[in-house]
Amino acid sequence: MNSNIGSASGLKMTYAAITKGTAALYAASLMTADHFDLLENLLDELKYSQPKVFDSLKSVNSISAKAFRWIGEMEEIADTFSFSNNSEKIHQGAAETFRKIASSPIGHERVDSIDKNRKIIETINLLNS
């Protein structure tokens, strides 16, 4: 890493932009599919055509335990993107997704209280409640 002031913060922001931003995209996409009664169809298609993405969706089952912490981080990332002349809207949307998740019926969950037996479809149904 270079020694410029802000490099470590920039790395942290861009790393989280990818990892946590992707989590928001997965959750929002699944919640949207559920809204249109297409969740099972989407999951079946992803399992068939994008098995690696399908496997990654498992992370959505624990997103309720982290969403409340990630709202502010997405807003900071949005500011970082804006400062670097890139659109901040992607991560503003991620912050909104995490805000919705945090206020859902399972938004109170924490890592040690997640229902580990809950299926992804059940999680998404609860996030959309």
Image (spheres, helix red, strand yellow):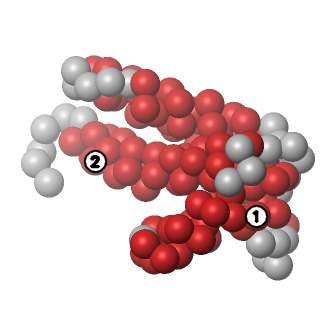
Looking at the image, can residue 112 be seen? no
Q: Residue at x 68, y 57 (%)?
A: 39
- The amino acid on which the numbered mark 1 sits, given as a three-letter code, is Ile
**Which residue in the protein does label 2 denote?**
11
In the rendered image, which quarter contains the N terminus? bottom left
The number of discs equals 2
Q: Residue at x 63, y 63 (%)?
A: 41
Kindly report which numbered mark, 1 or 2, lies closer to the viewer in this rendering: 1
Q: Is residue 39 depicted above or below 83 in this figure?
A: below
Q: Are marks 1 and 2 in contact (CB under 8 Å)?
A: no
**SS of the residue under disc 1:** helix
Other residues around mark 1 within 10 Å, as few (<14) / some (14–19) / many (≥20):
some
- The amino acid on which the numbered mark 2 sits, given as a three-letter code, is Leu
**Which residue in the protein does label 1 denote?**
121
Decide which of 53, 46 is in the foreground and name it.
46
Q: Is residue 57 depicted above or below 39 in this figure?
A: below
Sequence order check, earlier mark of 1 and 2: 2
Give how far apart the Cα atoms at labels 1 and 2 are: 34 Å
Does residue 73 appear left or right of residue 19 in this picture? right
Q: Residue at x 81, y 37 (%)?
A: 103
Does residue 43 appear left or right of residue 84 in this picture? right
Q: Residue at x 82, y 63 (%)?
A: 122
| Position of residue 114 measured from the top left corner of the image (x, y, whole percent) | 81, 67
Picture quadrant where residue 61 is located? bottom right
| Position of residue 5 measured from the top left corner of the image (x, y, whole percent) | 19, 35
| Position of residue 91 measured from the top left corner of the image (x, y, whole percent) | 46, 33
